[in-house]
Image (tube, grey):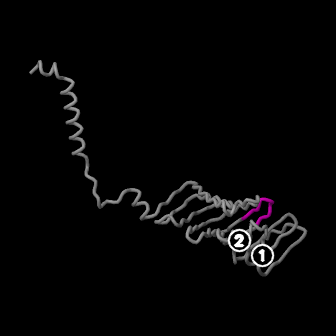
Amino acid sequence: MKTFFKKHWPLVGIALLLLVAVLYIFSAPKKDDNAAGFTDMLMEKGVELTENITITQENPDRGVKWVLNAEEIKFSENKAAYSGKDFRFRLEHKDGTQIKLEGEKVNYDRNSGEVNLRGNVNGQTENGYRFVTDHLLYREEKGSIETDAPVKMFGPFFSVSGHGLVFKPGEGTLRILADVTTYIGRNRQE
């Protein structure tokens, strides 16, 4: 027997290795087909991400890109919608128009193409105009930022307050819709 092991040790070693591998495979825990995988579980319950999350959406056909940065974002079960807290939202148009918005809460629905910005929303355009409101709605389809809430806007030599706002970066138009009060000659921030 001793001569057999001396003569055939490589084959015996391979056979032992195969035996250990077979035992390992058969002793591994069985996968339960009824149990959902980790990814499936996340998709069913929704996913919450924290610590400074950035989402970018680009539409080359319309020449628009927006970037959403939030401290916390929660995705819906089907990832068609998400909401966030303490956001920074930047909208860039192909003509160079850019607007930066900050606020408390943001919701985005891919099906409707609407970004809903709420809670002490502060905005600033690339040329220094600022405005403040409690709610803004960015509609991807129209390419407009809108609100029916009270709004205040500040420029270098004027300030305007009123109700409702429609801003179309592609057209370069900003309209305050009702109850407009304008102060010219100084930057009044009340």
Quadrant where the image shows the N terminus: top left
Amino acid beneath label 2? Thr
Question: Mark 1 falls on what kind of element?
Answer: strand
Q: Residue at x 29, y 61 (%)?
A: 34
Q: Residue furthest bottom?
A: 179
Disc with the residue nearer the chain's start (2 vs 1)? 2
Closer to us: 62 or 89: 62
- The label shown at residue 133 is 2
Q: Relative to residue 28, is residue 177 drawn left or right?
A: right
Which region of the structure is painted magenta? 123-130
Q: Residue at x 56, y 69 (%)?
A: 109
The quarter of the displayed image where residue 26 is located: top left
Mark 2 vs mark 1, CA separation in Å? 12 Å
Q: Relative to residue 186, is residue 128 drawn left or right?
A: left
Closer to us: 79 or 180: 79
Closer to us: 150 or 139: 139
Q: Residues within 10 Å of mark 1 (few under 14, many from 20)?
A: many
Does the residue at mark 2 contact the one at mark 1 (Cβ under 8 Å)? no
- The label shown at residue 31 is none
The quarter of the displayed image where residue 175 is located: bottom right
Closer to us: 101 or 26: 26
Q: Relative to residue 27, is residue 151 drawn left or right?
A: right
Residue 24 lies, in percent from the top left, at 24, 41
Amino acid beneath label 1? Ile
Where is 172 relative to 162, above or below? above
Question: Mark 2 falls on what kind of element?
Answer: strand
Residue topped by disc 1: 176
